[in-house]
C-alpha cells in the first residue's frame, strides 16, 4: 500500500490506469479523500461499476466489501481483484439483501438508489442490530448535478464531517470514446471537472419515519462498536411485545369470524 502519512493516500498513484472516467464514476480525487479515512477501518461500497474506487480503497482499508447488483460488472470486479491481487470481498446482489456492517458505507446515488432511500435502509438495519452503532455513511455530492445539490442542502445539518474537493478529468474524458455509454443520463464531459462535497453522516443520527429514535441505543456504543447486551435485550423485548400484540389481534379476529 502506498500511503503518504503527511498527505494521505493518492488514488491516482494506487490506481494509475482506471477503466472509467468522471462523471461515469466519481473522481479519483474524491476516492483519495475517502481513502484518507480508511486506514484500519472496514468499508462497504454500494455500486462499484468497474471498481476504480474500490481498487484504491481495498489497498488502504483493513477490509472492504463491494456490493454490485449488475452481474456483468460483478464478474468483472472479481476478475480485476484477482488479477491485481487486491483483497476484496464481492457481493453480487441487491444491497438490501447484502451484509452491510462496516465502519463506513459509501455510494454515489443514481436512481433507483437514492441517498434518502439508502440511509433509511441503513438506519433500519442498524436498529435490527445488523450494522454497528458507530457506523457512518460517506456520501458524495456533485455540485454540477441538481439532485446532488438538493440533497446536499437537505442533509448538511446531519454532517459530522465534510470536505470540498476540486477535480479535473476533462482531458481524459475528451480522449476516451465510451460509445453507447455516452447515452447514459447525465454523462457529459462538461461534468468531468468541477467540485464535489464528501461528507460523513452517523447512521444513528439519521431521522427515519419507520424506525423510532432510541437514545438508549445511541448511548450504548462500546469498544467493538456493536450492540451490547443491554441494547440487544431491549430490541428483543420490543420485538417480542410486537409479536405478542400481533398474535393477540389475530386470535381475536379468528374468534369473531367463528361467531359469525
Image (cartoon, rainbow, N blue to C red):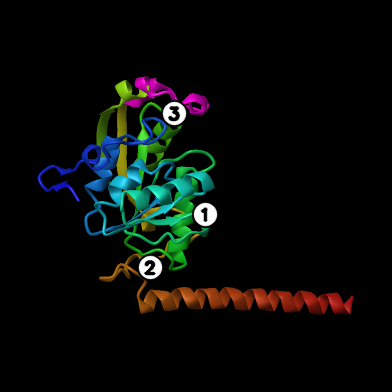
Residue furthest to the front in view is 83
Crowdedness of circle 1 by 10 Å Cα count: few (<14), some, many (20+)?
some
* Residue bearing the label numbered 3: 146
Q: Decide which of 213, 141 is in the foreground and name it.
A: 141
Mark number for residue 219?
none
Q: Secondary structure at mark 3?
A: helix
Q: Quadrant of residue 225?
A: bottom left
Residue at the image point whose x is 38% and y is 26% from the top: 144
Rendered location of residue 10, percent (x, y): 20, 41
Rounded to the nearest angstrom, the CA distance separating label 3 from label 1 is 29 Å
Residue furthest to the right in view is 260
Residue at the image point whose x is 26% and y is 55% from the top: 61
Magenta region: which residues?
A: 174-193
Q: Decide which of 118, 8 is in the foreground and name it.
A: 8
Residue at the image point whose x is 53% and y is 53% from the top: 94
Q: Secondary structure at mark 2?
A: helix
Front position among marks 2 and 3: 3
Q: Secondary structure at mark 1?
A: loop
* Residue bearing the label numbered 1: 93
Q: Considering only order in the chain, which callout, 1 or 3, is on the residue closer to the N terminus?
A: 1
* Residue bearing the label numbered 2: 217
Q: Decide which of 108, 255 is in the foreground and name it.
A: 108
Is residue 157 visible in the rendered image? The answer is no
Front position among marks 3 and 1: 1
Q: Is residue 190 covered in magenta?
A: yes
Rendered location of residue 247, percent (x, y): 67, 77
Residue 17 versus residue 170 in the image, above or below: below
Q: Is residue 182 covered in magenta?
A: yes
Q: Are marks 2 and 1 in contact (CB under 8 Å)?
A: no
Crowdedness of circle 2 by 10 Å Cα count: few (<14), some, many (20+)?
many
165 left or right of 142?
Answer: left
Q: Considering only order in the chain, which callout, 1 or 2, is on the residue closer to the N terminus?
A: 1
Amino acid at each position: 500500500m502506498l500511503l503518504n502519512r503527511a498527505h494521505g493516500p493518492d488514488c491516482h498513484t494506487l490506481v494509475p490506469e482506471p477503466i472509467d472516467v468522471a462523471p461515469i464514476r466519481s473522481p479519483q480525487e474524491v476516492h483519495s479523500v475517502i481513502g484518507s479515512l480508511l486506514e484500519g477501518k472496514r468499508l462497504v461500497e454500494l455500486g462499484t461499476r468497474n471498481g476504480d474506487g474500490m481498487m484504491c480503497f481495498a489497498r488502504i482499508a483493513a477490509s472492504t466489501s463491494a456490493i454490485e447488483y449488475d452481474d456483468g460488472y460483478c464478474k468483472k470486479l472479481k476478475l480485476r481483484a484477482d488479477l491485481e491481487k487486491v483483497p476484496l470481498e464481492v457481493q453480487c446482489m441487491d444491497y438490501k439483501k447484502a451484509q452491510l456492517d462496516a465502519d463506513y458505507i459509501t455510494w454515489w446515488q443514481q436512481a433507483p438508489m437514492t441517498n434518502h432511500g439508502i440511509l433509511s435502509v441503513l438506519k433500519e438495519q442498524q436498529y435490527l442490530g445488523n450494522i454497528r452503532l458507530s457506523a457512518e455513511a460517506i456520501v458524495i455530492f456533485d455540485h454540477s448535478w441538481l439532485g446532488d445539490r438538493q440533497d446536499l442542502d437537505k442533509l448538511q445539518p446531519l454532517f459530522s464531517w465534510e470536505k470540498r474537493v476540486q477535480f479535473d478529468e476533462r482531458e481524459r474524458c475528451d480522449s476516451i470514446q465510451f460509445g453507447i455509454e455516452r447515452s447514459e443520463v447525465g454523462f457529459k464531459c462538461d461534468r468531468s471537472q468541477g467540485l464535489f462535497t464528501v461528507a460523513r453522516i452517523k447512521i444513528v443520527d439519521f431521522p427515519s419515519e419507520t424506525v423510532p429514535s432510541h437514545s438508549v441505543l445511541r448511548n450504548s456504543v462500546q469498544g467493538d462498536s456493536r450492540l451490547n447486551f443491554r441494547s440487544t435485550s431491549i430490541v428483543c423485548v420490543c420485538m417480542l411485545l410486537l409479536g405478542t400484540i400481533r398474535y393477540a389481534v389475530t386470535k381475536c379476529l379468528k374468534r369473531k369470524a367463528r361467531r359469525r
